[in-house]
Image: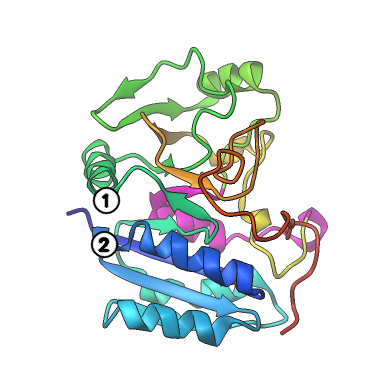
């Protein structure tokens, strides 16, 4: 199977986020990725670590970095542990609903097409890929996101980002982003959150990128309704234990 690292530098600060992390993990870990590099922050970090250690062995690298320098700085120190061609940016509140066999097939097609990044969640939530000159395999569509394709994408969905976080991507691309963090004047979000990792429609210096998305729904968000009725909770597929909280605009540099 394609060698891949599951990477996470997330903040587990409530019982609810801890429960969602467990459910997300259990939905895909049997695909047996090559390794896991996980940094956990927040007051539930030790409970989360105990859970991961229970299911993983020597393939797990686990840390508790939470410096004032922020998410990019701490993530950069973890690059030494990632030596696979691809990595998946694991979001703890997104769950695999397509099954383990499909997960494995997607990874094989990523390897065979040599794409730069593939989005694994928020499937068909908007029209950004309409009229794109795509190629396909059994599990994925892919296209070269160059200036021409970018123009089409912006016509379909003005403001569509060039790179967003819910992706499987080449290690080389991930390293390039991490080692070129936004300047303080360019940040939109608190320094200890990962949201500035994403590249908006104006940041065309990151192009071209061979970009892919799955032919059928792969992962889905627990509670983020990017369009009405999208989330697993809205579909009645995940319990509603508490209301949705946004972590994008608040600092989390506390324990």
User: Relative to 242, is 153 above or below?
Assistant: above
Residue ID at (46%, 52%): 95
Q: Residue 100 — which label?
A: 1
Instruction: Decide if residue 20 is on the left or right side of residue 37.
Output: right
User: Relative to 2, is 48 above or below?
Assistant: below
Q: Quadrant of the C terminus?
A: bottom right
Residue ID at (62%, 17%): 156
Q: Nearer the viewer, residue 244 or 192?
A: 244
Asked if residue 172 lies in the magenta stretch, the reply is: yes
Disc 1 residue crowd, few under 14, some 14–19, many 20+, Cα 10 Å: some
Give the percent coordinates (x, y) of residue 194.
Answer: 64, 61
Residue ID at (70%, 30%): 159
Give the percent coordinates (x, y) of residue 212.
Answer: 40, 34
Q: Nearer the viewer, residue 48 or 87?
A: 48
The magenta stretch is 165-188
Residue 19 placement: quadrant: bottom right
Badge 2 or badge 1: first in the primary sequence: 2
Quick check: can you spot residue 244?
Answer: yes
Give the percent coordinates (x, y) of residue 144.
Answer: 42, 27
Q: Residue 30 — which label?
A: 2
Instruction: Decide if residue 9 is on the left or right side of residue 100.
Output: right
Alpha carbon of mark 2 to alpha carbon of mark 1: how far?
7 Å
User: Relative to 129, is 224 above or below?
Assistant: below
| SS assignment at label 2 | helix
């Amino acid at each position: 199977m394609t060698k891949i690292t599951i990477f996470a530098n997330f903040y587990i600060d409530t019982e609810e986020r801890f429960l969602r992390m467990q459910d997300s993990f259990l939905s895909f870990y049997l695909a047996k990725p090559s390794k896991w590099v996980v940094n956990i922050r927040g007051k539930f970090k030790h409970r989360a670590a105990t859970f991961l250690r229970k299911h993983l062995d020597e393939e797990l690298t686990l840390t508790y970095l939470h410096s004032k320098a922020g998410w990019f700085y701490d993530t950069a120190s973890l690059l030494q542990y990632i030596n696979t061609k691809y990595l998946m940016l694991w979001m703890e509140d997104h769950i695999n609903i397509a099954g383990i066999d499909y997960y494995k097939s997607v990874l094989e097609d990523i390897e065979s097409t040599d794409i730069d990044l593939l989005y694994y969640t928020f499937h068909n939530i908007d029209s950004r890929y309409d009229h794109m000159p795509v190629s396909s395999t059994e599990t994925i569509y892919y296209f070269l996101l160059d200036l021409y394709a970018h123009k089409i994408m912006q016509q379909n969905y003005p403001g569509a980002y060039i790179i967003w976080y819910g992706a499987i991507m080449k290690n080389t691309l991930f390293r390039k982003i991490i080692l070129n963090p936004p300047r303080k004047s360019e940040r939109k979000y608190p320094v200890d959150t990962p949201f500035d990792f994403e590249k908006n429609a104006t940041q065309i210096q990151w192009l071209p990128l061979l970009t892919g998305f799955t032919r059928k729904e792969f992962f889905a968000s627990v509670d983020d309704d990017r369009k009405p009725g999208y989330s697993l909770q809205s579909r009645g597929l995940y319990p509603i234990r508490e209301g949705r909280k946004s972590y994008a605009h608040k600092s989390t540099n506390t324990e």
